[in-house]
Image (tube, rainbow, N blue to C red):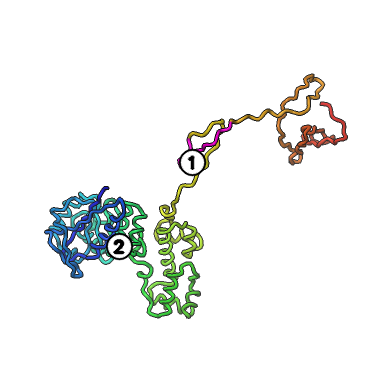
Amino acid sequence: MKQRTVLTVLFDGVQSLDVTGPMEVFAGASRARGVSYGLRTASLDGGPVRTTSGLTLVPDGSLADAPVPHTLLVPDGHGTRGAHPELTAWLREHAPRAKRLVSVCTGALLLAEAGLLDGHRVTTHWNSCERLARDFPAVHVNPDPIFVRDGRLATSAGVTGSIDLALALVEEDHGRELALTIARHLVVFLRRPGNQAQFSAQLSAQTAQRAPLREVQLWIDRNPAADLGVDALAARARLSPRHFARAFRAETGTTPGRYVERVRLEHARRLLEDSSDGVEQVARASGYGTPEAMRRAFVKTLATAPRPNTAAASGPPCPRPVPEPTDGTAPTDRPTDHPPDRSPVRPTVPDPPTERPFPCRSPSCSSTASPPWTPWAPTRSSAGRPGPRPSSSPNGPAPYTTTPGASRWSRRRRSPRSPRPTW
């Protein structure tokens, strides 16, 4: 069993949740069969450190004695705001040796001071994005996602974002099913994708002060597929549509239409990420009505088209049809998802050639043998209509006679009482 070592750097003023959150995810994954994460913590001198909440953490040892880890994690905390020349020097020397480098929240500031983020796409807490971009111009800061992956580098936005990032790393190592199992075990409401915004629609918009408007916001969140027009929402709030629109914008900071768009977009993204529903089902459940309307909303807001979760929708392979043999032999190359056919193979017997049941009546032909008969093919009359089909009587097809005055391609059946024509 291959063990992946996860080393978490500790320092005074560290955020305790940024340490324990990812460690709980990796520890939960290690309980699964065939999965092993070696969890270690280390500080500069190996001594205890005090967190921002007043807790005291005792590390496993010092950073100087720590082996090269598979994943090096630098957490957040007020301690990242000050100067740490010794810690920065250790990160500059040892961090490039790790196969995976992870920062949580403002831990990206320590990595940036060490020059490890130059030229990379990163994210951090929304309150520190401006400072990171201003102090380190070579770093490409994206303030929106909850975490960003750029090669071996992974950065997350905040405390709960570190749990989402740790779940994504477990999924990368051992698959989606294990990551979802850990999320359910930790009672995480949703294993969010990395490109999800740091603020949801409920967090981006302010909560209304009036109780009727708060009830409308709750109704929108719980019923994205309902009729969420201004008239319907105003009737639910017992206000006129014009008064409702003004009051909603004044108390939430956004219009009712934009709030509904954000809620429906987030609902669709959650269904696409964590369910096996197709695009059409997600569009109906999210209130878009048609996949094209949902696609336009995704392209407008996210600059990407919606895609179903193929990992959750995948099931057992569909059986493929086995072509029947045409040469009388048993097929030797069958798909692996079909059981072998043990039935005896019957040889293919060619059909005998069909002959005309009556002899040739031409005066110049003295042979009484029956010449081969060509199967019937439809003829066309001068008007463009198909000609009559021959009779299926046991005496063979009835001969044809030419109608006087008609086209030489126009034919009709011979009357039973008319004399047989000579050929």
Give the percent coordinates (x, y) of residue 70: 23, 51
368 lies left or right of 137: right
Residue that mark 2 sits on:
161
Q: Residue at x 48, y 65 (%)?
A: 287
Q: Is residue 69 above or below residue 377?
A: below
Quadrant of the frame with the C terminus: top right
Reply yes or no: does residue 184 show up in magenta: no
Cα distance between the residues tagged 2 and 1 = 48 Å
Which of the two marks, 2 or 1, is nearer to us in this view?
1
- SS of the residue under disc 1: loop
Query: The residue under label 2 is which amino acid type?
Result: Gly
| 60 horizontally vs 258: left or right | left
Front residue of 263/248: it is: 263
Q: Which mark is residue 339?
A: 1
Q: Position of residue 351 (x, y in %)?
A: 65, 30
Side (left or right) of 269 relative to 108: right
Residue toward you, 213 or 230 = 213
Image location of residue 98, percent across then percent down: 22, 50
Q: Quadrant of residue 80?
A: bottom left
Asked whether, in this view, residue 19 is left or right of residue 257, the answer is left
Q: Is residue 258 above or below residue 154?
A: below
Q: Which residues are magenta?
A: 333-346
Q: Earlier in the sequence, mark 2 or mark 1?
A: 2
Q: Secondary structure at mark 2?
A: helix
